[in-house]
Amino acid sequence: MKPLALASLLLAAPALPAYDLTIYTTDYPPLSMVSDGKQHSGIGYDLLQHAARVSGVSLDIRSNLPWKRAQQAAQNTVNTCAYPLTRAPEREALFRWVGLIHRGELGLFALNDVAAPTSLAAATRLRIVVMLGTTAENRLKERKLPYSTTRTPADSLLMLQDRAVDLWAVHDVVARYYAQQQHMAIRQVLPLARADSWLGCNRATTALPANKLATALEQLQQNGEARRIARHYLP
């Protein structure tokens, strides 16, 4: 092909969309929900879409990486973020914390007909499951509680349901959502830690889109829209 013809084709080709921020997420209902590997919904997704419209910041939301790799991408790549990230002391310096997604706490959950441990010391004698790469896993490590891991909360719940484990370490909002969806009788037996979920970005992220999105997310928390979105998933 002649150089002139090639240049004409390149000029005629549609431009690829440019996004202000690339955001990675994972299937962690109801904070983030992914179906067919690409269809997104959930509290965090709806909140971010609303904030993007208000702020004019364009977002490319993806779920094509395992959660641990998604967090690494946000740490290592400019203008890249991840949600839902629990804002915890060991993570404070790793991300630029842009906006709150949902308040909550981590706990140990059991089936209603299982005897509950009365302390974390008693829980060391029980079988615990947790999702890999989460702050719930970090809290279990800190307390020297033995555990096994899964890649999704749904897999953890299945192990609890099948009585392959005694306790499930997870966010209270996630346990509540699954209990409603699966019509399961589960309860929190012990607290682990406060665990608010945030959008966290690379620390070198461009200030203008990050600040605009942060302002929009704060407004949605203050005007009640964030609560309305949460009630849609947790009536």
Image (cartoon, grey):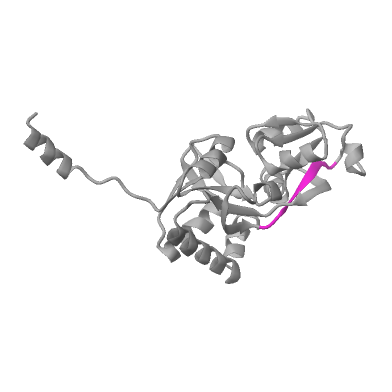
Q: In which quarter of the image is residue 123?
A: top right
Magenta stretch bounds: 103-112
In percent of the image, x 67 and y 55: which residue is there?
196
Give x and y (percent) for residue 29: 61, 46
* Residue 116 seen in the current view: no
Q: In this view, does 34 lie to the left or right of 117?
A: left
The quarter of the rendered structure image containing the C terminus is bottom right
Q: Main secondary structure of the magenta part?
A: strand
In percent of the image, x 66 and y 38: which residue is there?
153
Say which of 150 and 8 sits in front.
8
In percent of the image, x 82 and y 35: which residue is there?
145
The quarter of the rendered structure image containing the N terminus is top left
Give x and y (percent) for residue 120: 88, 42
Q: Does the magenta segment cover residue 125?
A: no
Give x and y (percent) for residue 220: 55, 66
Task: Spot the residue most to the bottom.
Answer: 223
Q: Does the magenta segment cover residue 109?
A: yes
* Residue 117 seen in the current view: yes
In percent of the image, x 67 and y 31: which residue is there?
150
Give x and y (percent) for residue 192: 79, 47
Say which of 222 and 139 sits in front.
139
